[in-house]
Amino acid sequence: QVQLVESGGGSVQAGGSTRLSCVASGYTTSGACMAWFRQAPGSEREVIATIHSSTGTTSYADSAKGRFTISHDIHKNTLYLQLNSLKNEATAEYYCAASPAKRTAIECQFSSVYRYWGQGTQVTVSS
């Protein structure tokens, strides 16, 4: 059974930093697309960043460029999202997602490729 478990959320001061982690179990993430999404109250879920676990190819939403960094440790089967210079509008539930293995880097840009989802971790940014 595939499981994704996020951790690292919480309350953060505006301008501060935090790192989210997502441990995958039950399958190998080799050659998979992995991503972080977020959903703020009253808003639709949006993709923040994606990474291909084998090529390391990444992509970011405009709101994340220059401030957030996605990374993946294939040996630990763990996905990370480093969030820096946080603004109030970053307050949301953050979800990690993963595709089945053996996907191409190009496929990572399509939300439909993500089959497995974590339960979410809340990040609250306050002034």
Image: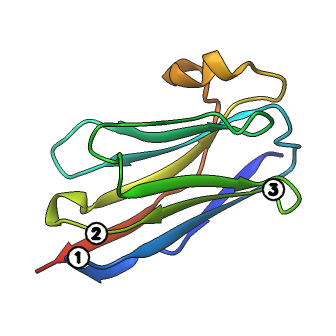
Residue at x 37% of width, y 76% of height:
17
Query: Tag 2: residue type?
Result: Ser
Q: Toward the viewer: 16 or 123?
A: 16
Tag shown at residue 98: none
Amino acid type, residue under disc 1 in the picture:
Gly
**Mark with earlier residue (1, 2):** 1
> Residue, x 22% and y 73% (percent of image)?
125
Q: Position of residue 12 (x, y in %)?
A: 29, 81
- The residue identified by callout 2 is 85
Label 1: element kind: loop
Mark 1, residue position: 15
Q: State the image coordinates of residue 10 (x, y, percent, origin top left).
A: 38, 79
Outermost residue toward the left? 127
Q: Are marks 1 and 2 in contact (CB under 8 Å)?
A: yes
The crowding category of the residue bearing disc 1, from other C-alpha atoms within 10 Å (few below 14, some 14 to 19, many at least 20), is some
> How busy is the neighbourhood of tag 2: few (under 14 within 10 Å), some, or many (20 plus)?
some
Mark nearer the viewer, 3 or 1: 1
At x 88%, y 43%, the residue is 28
Mark positioned earlier in the residue sequence (3 or 1): 1
Give SS at disc 2: loop
Looking at the image, residue 115 lies above or below residue 39: above
Q: Position of residue 34 (x, y in %)?
A: 64, 40
Quickly name the residue at label 3: 77
Q: Is residue 11 above or below residue 22?
A: below
